[in-house]
């Protein structure tokens, strides 16, 4: 009953939900850093969110000192995927135009 009441607030609705799927974590540059995608059911059981779990390579301030989470709607997740695809394409474009002298 308490969970149902608290799940009426959007932030708590996503925080109280259960993780139903997660990918293997990808290691970052720092020894303890990682990045992981996951799917979480909302606390009220009426929806799902795509989330990111991460511990950054570096941080400034206390918010980066612990594992951080962000949950996205499917529309925002699809935009994040499109943005990542654009960044990867730009990386390859720039990398192919750089000549390395050995």
Image (tube, helix red, strand yellow):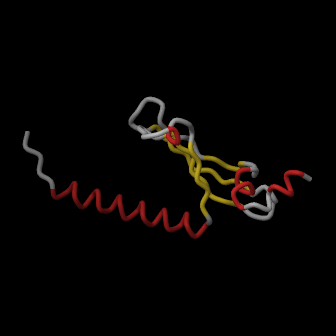
- Relative to 82, 40 lies left or right: right
- Indicate the quadrant where residue 48 lies: bottom right
User: Please, which residue is most extreme toward the left here?
Assistant: 101
- 42 up-or-down from 54: above or below: below
Tell which of 56 and 34 is nearer to you: 56
Residue 65 location (% of width, % of height): 51, 35
User: Please, which residue is most extreme toward the right here?
Assistant: 1
User: Please, which residue is most extreme toward the front here?
Assistant: 61
- Indicate the quadrant where residue 88 lies: bottom left
- 2 up-or-down from 62: above or below: below
Residue under the image location 61 percent in, 66 percent down: 74
The total number of labels drawn is 0
- Relative to 34, 72 lies left or right: right
Query: Looking at the rendering, in which quadrant would you find the C terminus?
Result: top left
- Relative to 81, 51 lies left or right: right
- 101 up-or-down from 43: above or below: above
Residue under the image location 75 percent in, 57 percent down: 13
- 26 up-or-down from 95: above or below: above
Residue under the image location 62 percent in, 58 percent down: 50
Residue 79 location (% of width, % of height): 50, 68
Residue under the image location 42 percent in, 60 percent down: 84
Tell which of 89 and 13 is nearer to you: 13
- Relative to 23, 92 lies left or right: left
Residue 100 location (% of width, % of height): 12, 46
């Amino acid at each position: 009953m308490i969970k149902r009441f608290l799940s009426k607030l959007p932030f708590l609705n996503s925080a109280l939900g259960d993780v139903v799927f997660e990918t293997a974590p990808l290691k970052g540059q720092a020894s303890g850093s990682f990045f992981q995608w996951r799917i979480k059911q909302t606390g009220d059981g009426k929806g799902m969110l795509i989330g990111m779990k991460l511990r950054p390579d570096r941080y400034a301030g206390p918010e980066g000192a612990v594992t951080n989470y962000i949950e996205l709607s499917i529309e925002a997740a699809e935009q994040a995927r499109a943005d990542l695809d654009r960044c990867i394409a730009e990386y390859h474009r720039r990398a192919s135009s750089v000549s390395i002298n050995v």
